[in-house]
Amino acid sequence: MTTTAQPTPPDLGTASPHGHGRLIGLLVASAFVVILNETIMSVALPDLMREFDVQATTAQWLTTAFLLTMAVVIPITGWLLTRFPLRTVFVAAMASFSTGTLVAALAPVFPMLVAGRVVQAVGTALMMPLLITTILNVVDERRRGQTMGTISIVISVAPAIGPTISGIVLDQLSWRWMFWIVLPIALLSLALGAAWVRNVTEPRDVPVDVLSVVLSALAFGGLIYGLSSIGESATGHTPVPVWLPLVLGGLALVTFVARQLRLRDRALLDLRAFRVRAFSVAVLLVAVSMMALFGTLILIPLYLQNVLGLSVLNTGLLLLPGGLTMGLLAPIVGRLFDRVGPRPLVAPGAALVSAALWGMTTLDAGTGQATVVGLHVLMSVGLALMFTPLLTSALGSLPPQLYSHGSAIVSTLQQVAGAAGTALFVTVMTRVTVARTEEGAALVEATADGVHAALMYGGVISAAAVLVALLVRRPGEPAAH
């Protein structure tokens, strides 16, 4: 962290490491709670489909809308963290998340439930870049790997154990209790943050480019909506042609990128970070990892319940070992990164993820539960080896003036990739299931074929990531020739 001679320096709360530790602890705990809600609905989808009489491609919007909203909001956080004090952004984030949680808990109809998830997502979108930017400003470079290991628990483990928590809750209570249980925790974090959080950056009065905000929303919103509409088209429920949002989103994205490069220092999202090779390679692999994580997190619960016939409780418990594995490995991987760098960890991790996804393509109606658990744990080990080194390498390779923009870029692409993975896997599964059903196959057999086809796509993508993983290097290390 650097300080300058200003008449009114930023209030650091307490300048001691203990003061920073308390700040980071609160931010990590708050981020864990809000990120947990990205996937907490996945096990509840079959129940919600029956209660609200909707198809799987419609029910998936409880996750996709959450991720889509984050992808739209996160690009603005680079500007927000530059313009406003840390406490202001934190209070806004937790207030939005708490409000959305209350709306979802009370929702009498499906659209209101989705609306509550969207409001939740606004708060979640603010929290992750806020946490990462704070870490980069207050943690010494030599200890970043270990600290980013803690952040990896938030980013990867919280979504991974979301299905387990929802399974336990749904076994005894209504799905609404998934929100009622979270609400008091969110309100407590809001109260503690208002009292404890202090600024660790120097706010600057910078203008916001409104056109960039609009282009960002059209780009990321159009692309994810289009991907999700492909799945809905399999059942004939598409209000607009599938190609339209994809084309509009693609055009808006190209225009958005061109405008950011032209605005340079006034950009909403400073894309000059991609000129740093280590950042670009690491971000690409993070995106692939998030596609695999979120795609399987929504697909496996549907497989366990609709093909193997398991209860929501058993589904959640079967996914727990994978989530715990990621949590236990994250700090260990962080310490290893500080010693050996990223490549010895990321390359084996990418290979394990690919092996797990290809193994999952063998899942069918006769697969044993132990096989599912084993493959999920294998994928979790691989993701744990990848997340911390990739995040630390990506952000640590940037100059300080790009920290807030770099964290916003990483967080944006994480959510876009997660939404794309969710949409891709469900789309392929739905199309194949419908086609097999029309051919006369039983529903269980047809669903198993759909899961197989979706995971084949994941396997192909992950195989390409293994090759890219060989290009990862430690920040400051010269590129191999």
Image (cartoon, rainbow, N blue to C red):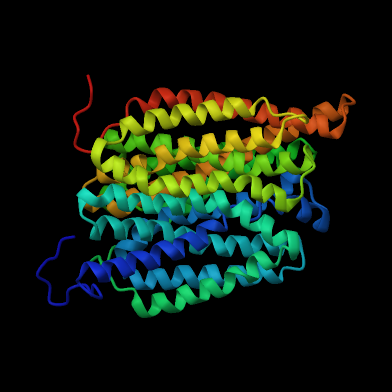
Image x and y of residue 385, in percent: 40, 38
392 or 309, which lies in front? Answer: 309
Q: Position of residue 238 (x, y in %)?
A: 74, 42
As rendered, which of 252 and 55 lies closer to the eye? 55
Position of the N terminus by quadrant? bottom left
Quick check: can you spot residue 94? Answer: yes
Relative to residue 36, is residue 287 drawn left or right?
left
- Point out residue 412 in the picture as x, y percentages from the top left corner: 44, 48
The quarter of the picture where residue 442 lies is: top right
| Identity of the residue furthest to the front in this view | 370
Measured from the top left, where is residue 322 in percent x and y?
A: 55, 43
In this rendering, the answer to whether 216 lies above or below 358 is below
Looking at the rendering, in which quadrant would you find the C terminus?
top left
Residue 269 can be seen in this image: no
- Residue occupying image coordinates x 63% and y 65%: 116
Q: Residue at x 80, y 39 (%)?
A: 236
Choose between 17 and 80: the one closer to the eye. 17
Relative horizontal placement of residue 475, taking residue 157 as reference (left or right): left
